[in-house]
Amino acid sequence: MSLVVMKFGGTSVEDPAAIGRTAAIVAGRVALGKQPVVVVSAMAKVTDQLLRAAAAAAQGDRTGAMAISTRLRSRHRDTAAALIENSADSAALIELIDQKFDSLDEILRGLAAILELTPRISDLIVSYGERISSRIVAAAFRERGIDAVHVDAREIIVTDSQFQRAVPLDAVIDKRAQEKLLPLTSLGKVPVMGGFIASNEAGITTTIGRGGSDFTGALVGGALSAEAIEIWTDVDGIMTTDPRVCPDALRVKVISFEEAAELAYFGAKVLHPATILPAVKKNIPVLVLNSRNAACEGTRITSLAPHCKSPFKSIAVKKKLSIIDVVASRMLMTHGYMSEIFAIFDKHQCAVDMVSTSEVSVSLTVDSNEKLPAIAADLSKLADVKYEGRKALVCMVGEDIRGQSGMAAQVFSAIRHINVRMISQGASEINMSFMIDEDDADEAVRSLHAAFFKDPDPAIFDVEARKV
Ligand code: ADP
Ligand code: ASP
Ligand code: MG
């Protein structure tokens, strides 16, 4: 059986037209004899709006929270009505949407009375996005002749209890996915489930981190040993950089797991950073595809990518970072000093992206802004501390950067007009990264792209697209 997991992001289910395209793509796979399992995000921007409603309610702004919920209710109802012509099916779906929004409203009203938004309640509130979108998509598929069955993702994706960024429990997920999904696919049915949402072992709703539907798709693909994991989005694939920043960006036709993971980790939003892990474990190819341009072959991510003649494959940017400088003015760095510093970051559960040291100082970059004052207070017991926000990390990924002499000189010459704060080329052979001011980031990316993607290797990049 050739089972494929097809994950559709928010823009691929944003309105009736997008859901119609998505249905046609899935029907196309079924017609080819494939056995799809479909994972969908909330409709575009819904997660942000639910979070906004939660924040308003928690501040006592009950009217504001209700206004957001009412707008969302209409959007989902209108989408359902436009997609489902059969009046009984349409009425049943709208009734179901109303029930979900009634319970959401109850939670928001409760929150406006309690005025305390815990991570657990936040997860419960945002879960409505995927819970409702997956119902609408399943009904729309059925209306279009696909034998779709809605499956509650929370019965399959089981996690620990770290609300908002819960960690999936792989062994439980493997077992649940096999028990609940394979009986459906073996009957030729198409399971449709929400991404991003999960539950802990006690059945309480959790979520696996923003952008996490890609990760859900990969977890399900890994559990079912799928033939491929398809990530359907609004761009032609992984591009040489974010096409919103640099319209000249080209599609990367093929890239390795390692390179894609590095790009995702360092900010290429097209893929959630954890997506690659389940795929690597079972060596399942991941395809990034465009639901608005389904004929395009997208990007293929596999264990081994062919040799690329160009030095870099893609440029990623991670914004909203801070730099912390720890200066041990009173003493030289002593044995155990670094571990004391890292213990503080650990205590605050704050991941460090980049580190550079001198004899008396350490600079670190972190992607948290809200935890910084508390971290700085703890660090100041050890040394003098300064921190600065609004930084961006630019990460250039390529096959063998370390092996190519003079590469750093070429990179920094391309952005000589920009002030570079920290540089790292040590940790990985395939990544060169550096830290700059956030305001310089887009300009830096465009300059680097112009310098390094002038004459790209046609075996790896879609150079034809540039000619048209
Ligand atoms: P979805 O809702 O389908 O998950 P996302 O918005 O999460 O989609 O990710 C797709 C977006 O990622 C694109 O619209 C694009 O702006 C952005 N992006 C950032 N870096 C890249 C890159 N290197 N290649 C392609 N897209 C990128
Ligand atoms: N809806 C969730 C988010 O916006 C998950 C996802 O879209 O991948 O973060
Ligand atoms: Mg995404």
Image (spheres, helix red, strand yellow):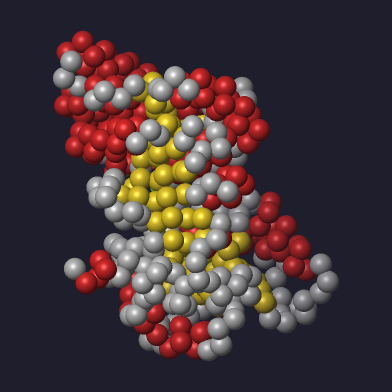
Instruction: Please state the horizontal and vertical placement of residue 424, each as a whole percent of the image.
Output: 58, 75
Instruction: Please state the horizontal and vertical placement of residue 264, each as a whole percent of the image.
Output: 48, 57
Instruction: Please state the horizontal and vertical placement of residue 141, each as a whole percent of the image.
Output: 29, 26
Q: Residue furthest top?
A: 88
Query: Residue 232 falls in which quadrant of the image?
Result: top left
Query: Residue 160 falls in which quadrant of the image?
Result: top right
Query: Residue 108 falls in which quadrant of the image?
Result: top left
Nearer to us in this view, 153 or 404: 404
Q: Is residue 335 found left or right of 426 in the rendered image?
A: right
Which residue is rendered at x = 33% and y = 54% of the image?
Answer: 297
Q: Is residue 85 found left or right of 327 in the rendered image?
A: left
Which residue is rendered at x = 63% and y = 75% of the image?
Answer: 426
Which residue is rendered at x = 19% and y = 68% of the image?
Answer: 468
Instruction: Please state the horizontal and vertical placement of residue 464, each as a whole percent of the image.
Output: 26, 68
Nearer to us in this view, 441 or 143: 143
Nearer to us in this view, 179 or 47: 179
